[in-house]
Amino acid sequence: MSSSTSTTERHYFFSRVLQREKLEPLPGREDRLLISFYLVKQSRCWYDHPWDFTYANSAAAQTGVMIYYRRREDYITSFARDLWTMDVPEEEMPTILKKISEVLQAAIPHRRILVMMADVTVRLLGSFDDRDAIENFIRASPDINVPMRFSITGDLGFETHTLSDVDYHGNTVADGLTLEIARLTLESFQTQRFRFVPATRSAIESLHKVRLDSLEKASMELNPSCSICYDDFAEDGVDQLVIPLPCAHHYHADCIIHWLERSHLCPLCRYALPTVEEGKPSNS
């Protein structure tokens, strides 16, 4: 599915959702399921001929959530929040959520689900402007690699997946299920937008940085990597500074501060920090 933002720029979106084959046991959390979201952006510039173009890839955003396996299908609409924090266009969300729903129905415990997305921006900078030819070319040969890294029981894992023509949103058939998910998702997105507001400045400033080795051993074992950037805490040593939230989940200081400036919810458990400064009236 493509959208036009100007006469010389268009966007094309790809996504793929799958469950990894490799088991990832979660000690003490056997009833949980990990879901990792990845978004890459690709910029393509066309000039004067069909083959006269340049392109560049960049990692745009990544995040992850941990959900209860037995209630996995109850979370499908709430994933719109995660997509929103990654700047995924609202019109692309229903297709992604439909793919997530299909994978969740057949999911098994202890295997991570990967949600991989790519936003391709095309700019016409020359005389060539055959948009149908450009769309067919991008759809047939997207050449989009999604590099991923995540912690697996304390060890850092790396994988790369390549998106193909079947992942192009323009190929998605808008069946009844897709339309229903779109309706429910966008209604929920609009009526619950308050959940996307940032935490108050005072709430963020009240959080304290602590040394990693000052945390309880059980907390370090259950939260061995930052769930925002996916870097393993062990890489930077036990004397690094992290910020634990009141819910006990901890993150790199810069990662969680940037996150809370956009969303007041803990990325892992959705613990809510204040959104209205004390002594000030709410706008709701």
Image (spheres, rainbow, N blue to C red):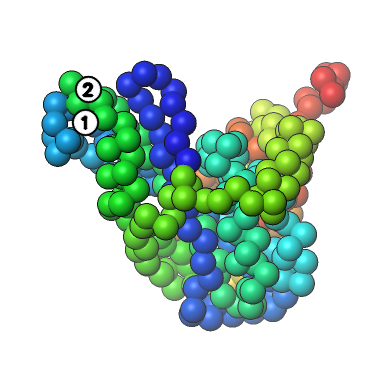
Q: Reading the chain from its start, which is encountered first: label 1 or label 2?
A: 1
Pinpoint residue 127: horizontal percent, then vertical percent. Answer: 18, 21
Quick one: SS at disc 2? loop
Residue at image location 45% in from the left, 36% down from the top: 2
Tell me how many marks there are: 2
- Is residue 99 at all visible to an observer of this figure? yes
**Marks 1,2: beta carbons within 8 A:** yes
Examine the image and state in which quarter residue 272 appears.
top right
* Label number found at residue 199: none
- Tell me the kind of residue under disc 1: Trp
Name the side, left or right, on which 153 lies relative to 128: right
Q: Nearer the viewer, residue 207 or 69?
A: 69
Q: Does residue 221 lie above or below 92 as drawn?
A: below
Pinpoint residue 261: horizontal percent, then vertical percent. Answer: 60, 33
Q: Does residue 218 lie above or below 43 as drawn?
A: below
Q: Which residue is mark 2?
A: 125
Q: Which residue is mark 1?
A: 46
User: What's the CA distance linking mark 1 and mark 2?
Assistant: 6 Å
Name the side, left or right, on which 198 lies relative to 191: left
